[in-house]
Image (cartoon, grey):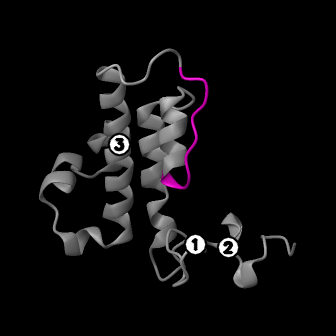
Amino acid sequence: MSEVTGEDIPELLLRTSTEQLRRTDPARLSVFAVAVVAHSEAVRRGALDGPVVACAGHSLGEYVALTAAGALTLRAAATLVAAARPCHEGGRPDPWRHHGRPGRGPAGAGGAPGGRRAGGR
């Protein structure tokens, strides 16, 4: 995962300061990496009995769910998570934040102003 993202993931998870993890880029990669590790460990320990019939996730969890379901390789999912980084730089709005209102995401995720769904409904 480190070679795909360009980040030292073990360093990020084990030695990064809380202050630095408050930034979107390292936080996003950390959340993704921990979720992948958690799923891998659950599989390794036999916590998931029988075949997986469905995987779901929200936000970064979608990438983890697609990886757990076998729809994306870990490399492909990590590439997509890392590729989102430029979208959050340069003063553009950060869609991973809730715009100061709990439970409200970006407009494209059903969190448009006034609680309306994107598209005006």
Camera-side mark, 3 or 1: 1
Residue furthest to the left in view is 15
| Amino acid type shown at disc 1 | Gly
**CB atoms at circles 2 and 1 under 8 Å apart?**
yes
Image position of 73 (left or right of 46): right
The amino acid sitting under disc 3 is Val
How far apart are labels 3 and 1 at the CA level?
A: 32 Å
Q: What stretch is highlighted in magenta?
A: 52-60
Q: What element carries label 3?
A: helix
Left or right, 5 with respect to 56, comes to left
Which residue does the image show at 54% across and 82% down from the upper left? 99
Q: Residues within 10 Å of mark 1 (few under 14, many from 20)?
A: few
Q: Identify the mark nearer the N-term, 2 or 3.
A: 3
Label 2 with label 3: CB-CB less than 8 Å: no
Give the distance between the C-alpha atoms of the residues marked 2 and 1, in whole angstroms.
8 Å
> Where does residue 37 sit, x and y in percent of width and height?
31, 37
Q: Is mark 1 on a helix, strand or loop?
A: loop
Q: Dominant secondary structure of the magenta stretch?
A: loop
Q: Give the residue pinned by disc 1.
A: 103
Residue 108 on image: x %, y %? 70, 67
Q: In this view, does 17 lie above or below 40?
A: below
| Residue receiving disc 2 | 111
- Seen in the picture, residue 70 relative to 23 is either above or below; the reply is above
The residue at which mark 3 appears reads as 4
Position of residue 35 measured from the top left corner of the image (x, y, whole percent): 37, 44
Measure the C-alpha gap from mark 2 to mark 3. 31 Å
Tell which residue pokes out farthest to the right in this image.
Answer: 121
> Horizontally, is 4 left or right of 106 in the view?
left
What is the crowding at mark 2: few (fewer than 14 residues within 10 Å), some, or many (at least 20)? some
Query: Mark 2 vs mark 1: which is more N-terminal?
Result: 1
The percent position of residue 57, horizontal first and vertical second, equals 55, 46
